[in-house]
Amino acid sequence: MLNALTMGSMSAMTKRKAAEVFPFLERYIARKEEQIAEIEQVIERYEKKRLIEERNYQAMSSFRKIFAGKKPDHHLAVEYIHYVKRPMEQIRQLRAEAEQARAILNGSKPSDYVAISDDLEKEIGL
C-alpha cells in the first residue's frame, strides 16, 4: 500500500491517521474528476469547432476556396497541441493524482496511519 503512495512523488511524506484524511480525500477526488470533465469539454468543443470549419471549407466551391483561404497545416498543428495534446497530458496527470488518493482511500482502514505527501496535504487542506 505504501509503495503505491510513494510512486511518482519524491516530496516529503507525513503520517496521518486515515480516519482524519478520508473526508478530505473524497472531496479531493471529486474535485479532480470535475477538473477532468471540464478539460474534456474544452477538448470536445475545439474538435467540434474544427470539424465544422473543415466541413464548411469542403462545402465551398473551388472558386470560393481560392479567396477564402485555409489555415496553414502548421497552424493547425500548433492549435492541436494547445487545445488537445497538452490538456490530455493534464488529464493523465489528474487521473494519476486521483488514483493515488483512491489507493489511500481503498487500501487502508480508518485506524491505520497512512503516508501523505506534503503536496497532497497542502491540496486537501490539512
Image (cartoon, grey):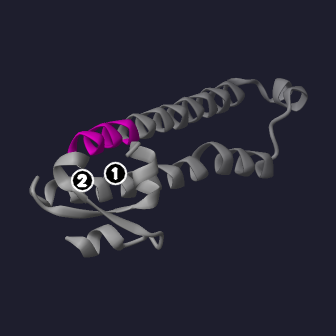
Under mark 2, the amino acid is Arg
Labels 1 & 2 near each other (Cβ < 8 A): yes
Q: Which residues are magenta?
A: 22-32
- Circle 1 residue: 98
Q: What residue sits 67% from the left and 24% below the top? A: 56
Foreground residue, 1 or 35? 1
Q: Residues within 10 Å of mark 1 (few under 14, many from 20)?
A: many
Question: Residue 16 colored magenta?
Answer: no
Foreground residue, 104 or 67? 104
Question: Residue 23 colored magenta?
Answer: yes
Under mark 1, the amino acid is Ala
Q: Position of residue 50 (x, y in %)?
A: 63, 33
Q: Is residue 56 above or below residue 105?
A: above
- Circle 2 residue: 102
Viewed as shown, does residue 21 lie left or right of 36? left
Q: Residues within 10 Å of mark 2 (few under 14, many from 20)?
A: some
